């Protein structure tokens, strides 16, 4: 509602004395007309003073039938959850003994989380599939001259993916535990995210040097319904080869439950916060002959738990090897052009895939596309877009890299991967990068390009 004093312009009084005396010399008819006109002005003036000028915002002037058909509750978000209600009923947040720190384990988390959801029923619906993506980077500026720019683009990529699929995202650039740095820094962040987001069933950790390269693909959560942790890995490499690279801990999906809280406690006890940190490094090197560095690391620690306590952990951890839950960049980036061409070939024969559409309905078109990808395969050698391309061995911020390849191959590969992913987003906005190696130029594409042409 607009306040009356600001809803209409101030006007001079209709009772103002006339300055032109020739008015009184006009014929009687004109005099009568003038007096009547002044009277109408007087009535209108008093009416406007007591009656505010209507607000011409669309929500007010829309026909009542439309308003009744589409009620708007400003207390709810676009996903039907009430963001303005936090009842006074006590929850775990009111418990002074509750701690976000790794040093203090959380107990009865399943019960506490269920209690919170009971008091926030709008979040309970859909909670089983709700995901919060968590990522982060170092607290200080990068040493690599292009490192901060690369990290920004890696983060933008994750934001794009989350926006398309309706996921929340948290980016952390601080050490939440002073001793848990480097690859161990993720564990205190993941625990804190679990406590901060009781409405989410899953926390999805994605390293800063990993990016989504299939912006349409959604995780098959139904496949993981009986598991609490999902990582890219291979049982044979764990139990037969005893390799520390038998899984990759840079990307994992962890259920927001007590089992996961207990795992994080055990997992972090092998990290720098432990007085036995050096001992754990020695144990890992003795167990995994291909581990060349002496420090205990998060990946070797997780493999160690699976290897030494199979009965306790194996049934709860899903080793995803059917698709690129995360994929080694060296075997992926060279195939982007072929993948692009194969997808365009599909679209040339499928007008419904060429149809332009709102970004919010992208998942429907992903479902349309699946029927054409049955022969694409998955993983190495496939021409399907990899879900995540992971630049393991390349450190965009420090500039360090594995000596197996030159640094330029890392940075050039990142630019190519970022543009490959960005094209999938930009198409919804009418543009694409015509050259995957050049981030600075874009080409406008038509709403439905001819069947014998591509959009780039």
Image: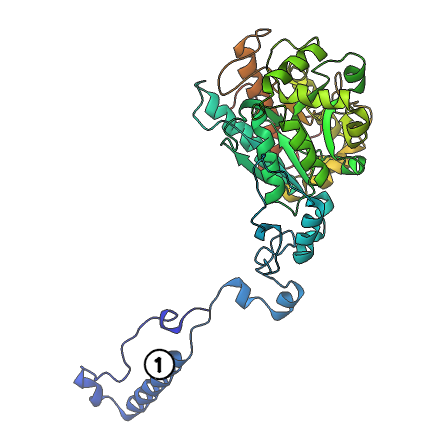
Q: Provide the residue designation for mark 1.
A: 45
Residue 419 visible in rendering: no
- What x and y, as percent, mark residue 216? 69, 34
- What x and y, as percent, mark residue 120? 65, 56
Position of 67 relative to 207 (above/below):
below
Where on the picture, by quarter, is residue 10? bottom left
Where on the picture, by quarter, is residue 43? bottom left
Q: Residue furthest front?
A: 275
| Quadrant the C terminus occupies | top right
Horizontal relation, residue 33 to residue 403: left or right: left
Residue at image location 57% in from the left, 20% down from the top: 414
Asked whether 211 or 418 is in front, the reply is 211
Residue 277 visible in rendering: yes
- What x and y, as percent, mark residue 144? 45, 18
Asked whether 20 or 311 is in front, the reply is 311
- What x and y, as percent, mark residue 127? 71, 47
Residue at image location 62% in from the left, 45% down from the top: 197
Q: How is the image coloured?
A: rainbow
Residue at image location 59% in from the left, 34% down from the top: 102
Q: Residue furthest bottom?
A: 28
């Amino acid at each position: 509602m607009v306040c009356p004093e600001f809803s209409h312009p101030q006007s001079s009084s209709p009772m103002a004395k006339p300055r032109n005396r020739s008015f009184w010399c006009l014929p009687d008819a004109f005099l009568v007309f003038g007096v009547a006109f002044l009277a109408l002005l007087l009535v209108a003036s008093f009416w406007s003073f007591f009656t505010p000028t209507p607000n011409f915002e669309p929500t007010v002037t829309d026909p009542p039938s439309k308003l009744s058909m589409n009620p708007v509750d400003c207390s709810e978000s676009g996903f039907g959850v009430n963001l303005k209600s936090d009842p006074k009923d006590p929850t775990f947040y009111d418990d002074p003994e509750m701690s976000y720190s790794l040093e203090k384990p959380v107990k009865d988390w399943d019960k506490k989380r269920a209690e919170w959801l009971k008091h926030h029923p709008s979040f309970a619906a859909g909670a089983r599939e709700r995901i919060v993506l968590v990522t982060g980077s170092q607290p200080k500026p990068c040493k690599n001259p292009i490192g901060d720019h690369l990290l920004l683009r890696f983060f933008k990529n994750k934001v794009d993916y989350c926006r398309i699929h309706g996921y929340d995202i948290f980016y952390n650039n601080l050490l939440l535990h002073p001793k848990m740095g480097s690859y161990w820094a993720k564990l205190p962040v993941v625990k804190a995210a679990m406590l901060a987001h009781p409405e989410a069933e899953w926390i999805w950790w994605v390293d800063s040097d990993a990016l989504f390269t299939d912006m349409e693909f959604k995780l098959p959560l139904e496949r993981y319904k009986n598991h609490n942790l999902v990582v890219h890995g291979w049982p044979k490499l764990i139990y037969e080869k005893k390799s520390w690279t038998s899984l990759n801990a840079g990307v994992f999906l962890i259920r927001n439950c007590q089992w996961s809280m207990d795992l994080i406690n055990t997992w972090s006890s092998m990290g720098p916060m432990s007085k036995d940190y050096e001992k754990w490094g020695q144990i890992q090197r003795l167990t995994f002959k291909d581990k060349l560095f002496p420090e205990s690391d998060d990946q070797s620690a997780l493999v160690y738990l699976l290897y030494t306590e199979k009965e306790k952990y194996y049934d709860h951890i899903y080793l995803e090897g059917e698709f690129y839950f995360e994929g080694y960049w060296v075997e992926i980036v060279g195939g982007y052009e072929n993948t692009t061409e194969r997808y365009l070939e599909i679209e040339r024969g499928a007008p419904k895939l060429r149809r332009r559409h709102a970004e919010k309905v992208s998942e429907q078109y992903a479902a349309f596309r699946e029927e054409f990808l049955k022969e694409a395969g998955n993983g190495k050698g496939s021409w399907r877009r990899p879900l995540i391309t992971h630049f393991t061995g390349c450190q965009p911020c420090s500039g360090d890299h594995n000596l197996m390849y030159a640094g330029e191959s890392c940075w050039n590969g990142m630019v190519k991967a970022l543009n490959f992913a960005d094209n999938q987003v930009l198409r919804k906005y009418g543009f694409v990068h015509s050259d995957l190696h050049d981030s600075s130029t874009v080409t406008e594409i038509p709403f439905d390009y001819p069947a014998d042409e591509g959009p780039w």
